[in-house]
Image (cartoon, rainbow, N blue to C red):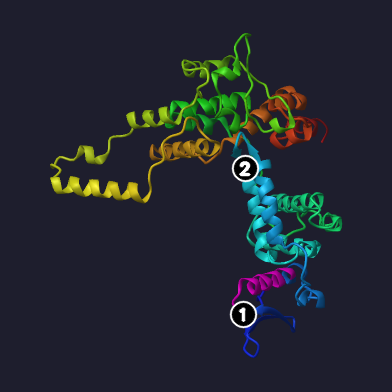
């Protein structure tokens, strides 16, 4: 059953905006202003989250004084841009923090930071649920909002009671919320990995093979360089110059066995500081192996007017959307897109193949190692500090349970 939302209305006598919730009128300030619309969204969000009529304290404007949410976020952002950076570049956590704080600013931006309490946080969380976000993502974003107020307490921008109160809001529980559940990441079958290899460039195919053989993260395989690989022993050791837990001062060392070495050898004949897998080389390979276009097969001559029209169309496309030059290395996003391009080429060649993404290769390796060598071995292979994290990546092996059921059940 859909909920009928209270309307944002004009009170003609005073020129103020108002909203009526369960028979109670709430005046929002001058009609049509950003502040009044923000208060409208805030009151409706709180009502949707609690299903209770607003209290007198919330139906009137807060007393003036104290830093606003917008001001707090602005101050915090100056700190975050330097804290969430690596080698002078912003990390993905900065983008995640931006997405987490957006509904807070939208619903409560002009309100006082010291007035942001559990009820307001639940309203923001309800807003995320209505956007269709998954339960896990919502919990992570709520955690980032709490982190903002923890930082604000440390900087003496809000009273400690604000953060303490927000800690009372627990995360959404499985099966006890309207938020949707995200599909867990599953291992990808080797036959689907092998099916896409002929339809991607040698560089992407090598990254796929190496990741499947080692279980390294996508962000680790795209930055491989010869100078980061120790080849003095039978088993090579790859130590990426950057990795997920570098900020914890942890080392990441990845053994490369004979199969992985064989895949890497053709890419080692370059400068030791150069990245092994180059998008520029992959682009050149695609141009060399592109299929014959139907225009190349045409029998009739191409008239000068047609050539001029083509050139004009090309110039217009370049002006509208300039083509970015290929970088020195792949990013995790361009690596994923290169694999998706392989899916399209495979389907054009009548190869039925489901979509999968690079992180599933890590799950496949984790499941394989855990099955054959145990949880501790999988933990060491993946570079996890805790075994419970490895359990997320490794599918639980049912063979033992099947054998017990066969023998005793």
Q: Residue at x 48, y 17 (%)?
A: 271
Tell whether 205 sits left or right of 71: left
Q: Judge whether 132 appears above or below 9 on screen.
A: above
Query: Can residue 129 be seen from the camera position used here?
Result: no
Identify residue for label 2. Answer: 92
The mark lying in front, picked from 1 and 2, is 1
Q: Quadrant of the N terminus?
A: bottom right
Tell whether 222 sits left or right of 301: right
Residue extending farthest to the bottom is 13
Secondary structure character of the magenta stretch overall? helix
User: Is disc 1 placed on a helix, strand or loop?
Assistant: loop
Is 45 within the magenta?
yes
Is 91 within the magenta?
no
Tell whether 109 sits left or right of 223: right
In this view, the residue in front, 267 or 112, is 112
Q: Residue at x 62, y 42 (%)?
A: 92
Q: Distance from label 1 to label 2 (Cα)? A: 39 Å
Q: Judge whether 22 appears above or below 68 on screen.
A: below
The local crowd at label 1, few if under 14, some if 14 to 19, many if 20 or more residues have their Cα within 10 Å, is: many
Residue extending farthest to the front is 65
Q: Judge whether 199 appears above or below 16 on screen.
A: above
Span highlighted in magenta in the image? 31-46
Mark identifier at residue 31: 1
Mark identifier at residue 361: none
């Amino acid at each position: 059953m859909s909920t009928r939302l209270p309307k944002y209305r004009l009170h003609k006598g005073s020129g103020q905006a108002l909203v009526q919730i369960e028979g109670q009128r709430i005046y929002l300030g001058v009609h049509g202003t950003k502040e009044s619309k923000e208060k409208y969204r805030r009151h409706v969000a709180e009502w949707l989250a609690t299903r209770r009529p607003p209290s007198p304290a919330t139906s009137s404007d807060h007393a003036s004084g104290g830093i606003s949410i917008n001001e707090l976020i602005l101050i915090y952002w100056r700190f975050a841009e330097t804290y969430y950076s690596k080698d002078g570049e912003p990390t993905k956590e900065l983008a995640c923090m931006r997405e987490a704080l957006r509904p807070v600013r939208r619903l409560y931006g002009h309100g006082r930071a010291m007035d942001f309490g559990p009820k307001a946080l639940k309203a923001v969380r309800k807003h995320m649920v209505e956007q269709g976000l998954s339960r896990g993502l919502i919990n992570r974003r709520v955690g980032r909002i709490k982190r903002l107020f923890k930082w604000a307490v440390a900087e003496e921008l809000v009273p400690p009671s604000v953060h303490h109160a927000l800690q009372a809001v627990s995360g959404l529980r499985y099966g006890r919320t309207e938020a949707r559940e995200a599909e867990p990441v599953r291992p990808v079958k080797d036959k689907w990995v092998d099916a896409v290899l002929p339809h991607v460039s040698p560089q992407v195919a090598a990254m796929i093979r190496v990741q499947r053989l080692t279980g390294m993260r996508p962000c680790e395989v795209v930055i491989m360089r010869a100078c980061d690989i120790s080849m003095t022993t039978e088993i090579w050791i790859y130590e990426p110059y950057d990795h997920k837990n570098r900020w914890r001062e942890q080392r990441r060392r990845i053994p490369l066995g004979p199969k992985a070495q064989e895949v890497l050898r053709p890419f080692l004949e370059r400068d030791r500081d150069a990245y092994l897998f180059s998008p520029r080389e992959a682009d050149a390979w695609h141009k060399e192996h592109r299929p014959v276009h139907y225009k190349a097969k045409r029998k009739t001559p191409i008239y000068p007017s047609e050539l001029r029209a083509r050139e004009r169309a090309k110039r217009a496309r370049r002006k509208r959307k300039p083509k970015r030059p290929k970088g020195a290395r792949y990013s995790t996003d361009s690596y994923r897109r290169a694999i998706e391009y392989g899916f399209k080429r495979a389907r054009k060649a009548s190869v039925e193949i489901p979509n999968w993404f690079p992180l599933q290769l890590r799950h496949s390796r984790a499941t394989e190692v855990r099955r054959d060598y145990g949880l501790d071995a999988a933990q060491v292979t993946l570079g996890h500090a805790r075994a419970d994290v490895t359990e997320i990546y490794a599918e639980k092996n049912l063979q033992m349970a099947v054998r017990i059921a066969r023998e005793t059940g």
